[in-house]
Amino acid sequence: MKHLISIGIITAVCFAGELLYFLLPLPIPASIYGLLLMLILLLTGIVKVHQVELTSNFFLTIMPLLFLEPAVKLMTSLPTLKGNLISILFLCLVSTIIVTAVTGVTAEKICALKKVTDQDNIPKIKKNKEHKSAKKHQKNNTVKAKENRHEY
């Protein structure tokens, strides 16, 4: 029963995405509308994660099978692509390099931002420790000074 409800929710969201694609004059695929709708429903709590989790995990496990047909069609259309094969491979190489570079720069900036945020907290902690140790040291010096006065 859980799977039926989950499939029903996912199907309804996909159908709503198709409906939005038909109604709105934007060049956005219906699947993107569906994903955005599902995100909104999950974020607002209208749909709970546990309601769609089992079926979603199932779809993720069979996803490679879903790409089998497009791969076969690509292989059958290889003679058509042969004339543009070098330019297609060049575009794939350039786009891979660009995506890798942008991902690396973004990751570095996020790490640097995290270090800055962490660094902001470290001096406060150090200052508190230094302040406490300075007080303790001062107290020890005061006690030693008093003891020295009593000895003389």
Image (cartoon, rainbow, N blue to C red):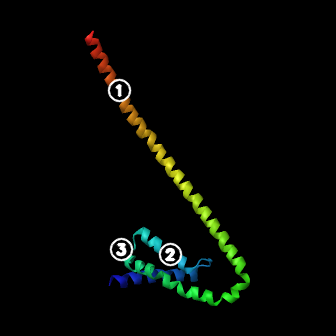
Q: Is residue 94 visible?
A: yes
Q: Kindly state the secondary structure of the residue where label 1 is placed.
A: helix
Which circle marks residue 50 in the picture?
3
Residue at position x 42%, y 35% from top? 127
Q: Kindly state the secondary structure of the residue where label 2 is placed.
A: helix
Q: Is residue 42 above or below residue 78?
A: above
Residue at position x 40%, y 33% from top? 130
Which circle marks residue 35 in the picture?
2
Check whether the beta carbons of the residues at disc 1 and disc 2 lie within 8 A of each other. Answer: no
Q: Amino acid at mark 1?
A: His
Q: Is residue 117 left or right of residue 84?
A: left
Locate the N terminus by quadrant: bottom left
- Residue 97, horizontal then vertical, whole percent: 64, 66
Crowd around label 1: few <14 · some 14–19 · many ≥20 (10 Å) = few
Q: Kindly state the secondary structure of the residue where label 3 is placed.
A: helix
Q: Is residue 141 left or right of residue 26?
A: left
In this view, which residue lies farthest toward the top? 152
What is the distance, in whole Å, between disc 1 and disc 2 at their CAs?
Answer: 62 Å
What is the distance, in whole Å, between disc 2 and disc 3 at their CAs?
Answer: 17 Å
Q: Is residue 76 above or below residue 96?
A: below
